[in-house]
Amino acid sequence: MSLSHKASVQVGPDGRLRHLLSTEGLPAEMIRRILDTADQFVSVSEREVKKVPLLRGKSIFNVFFENSTRTRTTFEIAAKRLSADVINLNVGASSTTKGETLLDTVWNLQAMDADMFIVRHSQSGAPHLIARHVKPGVAVINAGDGRHAHPTQGLLDMYTIRHYKKDFSALTVAIVGDVLHSRVARSQIHALKTLGVPDLRVIGPKTLVPAQVERLGVRVFTDMAEGLKGCDVVIMLRLQNERMNGALLPSAGEFFKCYGLTAQKLAHAKPDAIVMHPGPMNRGVEIDSPVADGRQSVILPQVTFGIAVRMAVMSMLGSP
Amino acid sequence: MMKIEIRGGRLLDPAGGGERQASVFVADGLIAALGKAPDGFRADETIDATGLDVCPGLVDTSARLREPGFEYKATLESEMRAAVAGGVTTLACPPDTDPPLDEPGLVEMLTRRAEGMRLARVYPLGALTLGLKGERLAEMAELHEAGCVGFSQGDGPLPNLATLFSAMKYAATFGYTVWLRPEDAALAGGGVAHEGEVATRLGLAPIPAIAETVALRTIIELMAASGARVHVSRLSTGAGVDLVAEAKKRGAALTCDVGIHHLHLCDRDIGDFDANCRLSPPLREPADRDRLRRGVAEGTIDAICSDHTPVDEDAKQVPFGEAEPGATGLELLLPLTLQWGRESGLKPAQALAAVTHRAARILGVASGTLEVGANADLCLFDPAKPWVVTPQALSSQGKNTPFQGLELTGRVVRTIVGGRTVHAN
């Protein structure tokens, strides 16, 4: 029996992007269009006056049910450079603790004439739920939901890789570390597959690799040296503090010994491989300082490109 | 007492496996004869069943009625109406109410109220441990006297092994059946979806298949050591079906059931986080579903239950992982069982065995047959009638179902309990 599953919430029947919830299901053409649009915004950020009037008069609500200063700030900067009005709500600390439901919170904010919601939530799928219940014309951007997705991060990573490597169709890419809990890894995997990366790998101990991840089109390596061999791109994931000592891993030290990216391990990759990290980094846990600050690191450019990519997504969703 | 003739229908007798055109003669609330009227029988009422199938009223091994304690989700009244609207005339309800069914007074109150409604026959399961906390044994003998047909932890975690072993030995003392849902709480810990590609994709906390099989192996070991009779509630994995088949082959006093949703759906159906597919146990992979389907057909799985769990809309309009598990099922049990039967190449009478006499045997009650002398609990349904699952089409207060908007075939026209029409459509 097949259930009458609703059409994609994210892409309308006309092929237009209505919300950005996941990189899964985004056609390659759409991803390229987002990256091309971001190209134009990179130059805006380099100008004296870093503003364009594309979203003037629009109200963008940053609704963070899970705390994050970093991501919220990048969205705020992107919105302001598009001349939108930005309202920041740290909901984690207010409504839900008073017992208000997620949808009530959203409907209340919608009644304040929001045009766009940037949502972060600890539960996978929360932005989908919101997107299904907002008025037509109101857009939702997923700024990270549980372990599910962080699509703007995935897209800014694609932008970064394209910037340095041009063509996806001959690349070997490795994603290293806590894939199990990583929404960033999932967003990267879907986007990299869609863009045609032929050799995509994840590297980590079996406790941090999710079940059947191969079915997403990746090869699993448990040995760092073997997994890094011949890579063009090495993406390190953040290891959350609470996962360093417990049933999944014995210690941060042992993790660093086996999976921390040092110059010595990086030597297994191609000489011109780039090193990426979504931040914030744990130096000495997943990455060694000489590598984080070294010539192959593109970690700070990722942040810069992130603003442009978020501007691109917002402008595409917010313009009529 | 009333004498009734139901004529013109096609009789489906799952116990005998037969199908034939024949009248049913009812007297004093019992089946008096089939085919030919008994001598001197004069019907006070004649029911025309032309074009309809007539089968024993359905027996459901797991339906939550939500009382006491969860009246905002559903009431005894609404769910008893849902039962008979679905052709279910006998049901077992798990003890996970609030308070749980751990003392005789609560059980008596529930059965007395249910009897007063004169709809379906309700057989409660008593709590295996006080408050379902897994620490102290509930008063099983007292609860049995109050009407409990078995003892269970509901959907709560199994007690620690020492307590579980002891509870099983105690139940075995009196010959009571222990109903257990095989799930190792630590392995399932915090999970909300089957561990596999879908949970990985959606980033949902996983429940591995071994949470079921490890618990099942443990239960089978403890059964052998304690001598208890066990009914395994709601299998969800293919490996679980194999374990049960093996145990039965060795002669273990084991029965088991499966929820109707698990015969039709799998983890792929979660789609984009459809909270109506948040079930407990979780929907598993297509291969598991197929093994479960074969398991019922071959008889390894004794019964199909509705696993009816009405959930209020607020508890489903939340992110998937926070949604309350469960789906409404009483009114879908018949059409979905018929559909599974058709798709498995079974005749309707064969398919219905899993929701009639095979289910009644688990409860230890004399329902689910068309034998002369049995209670006249009957379900008359239109086997070809298509209908769409909508909130309006359901009597249950729970409108939560993954089948929302889908067209099903087979609709109950009349339900009779003890010779009395309790639902007519």
Image (cartoon, coloured by chain):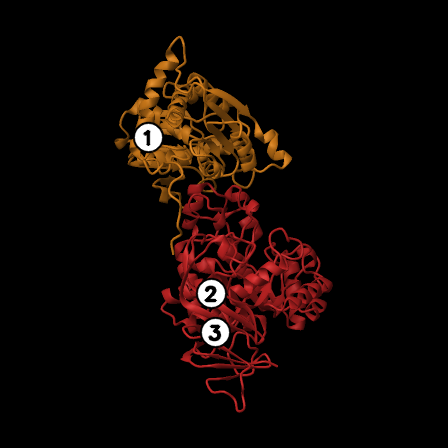
The type of residue carrying mark 2 is Leu
Evaluate if marks 1 and 3 touch, with contact meaning CB atoms under 8 Å apart. Answer: no
**Residue type (three-letter) at the residue carrying disc 1:** Ile
Disc 1 and disc 3 on one polypeptide chain = no
Disc 2 element: helix
- The residue under label 1 is A31
Instruction: Please name whichever residue, A146 or B13, is drawn nearer the observer in this view of the structure.
Output: B13
Q: Colour of chain A?
A: orange
Which residue type does callout 3 highlight? Cys
Locate residue B17: give its quadrant. Answer: bottom left
The correct choice, above or below, for A36 with respect to A245 in the image is: above
Kindly report the distance in space between the C-alpha atoms of the residues bearing marks 3 and 2: 11 Å
Query: Which residue is most to the top?
Result: A48
Q: Is residue A38 above or below residue A51?
A: below
**Within 10 Å of the Cα at label 1, are there few (<14), some (14-19), or many (20+) other Cα atoms?**
some
x and y, in percent, of residue B267 in the image: 43, 50
B8 with respect to B220 (left or right): left
Chain B pictured colour: red
Residue beneath disc 2 = B334
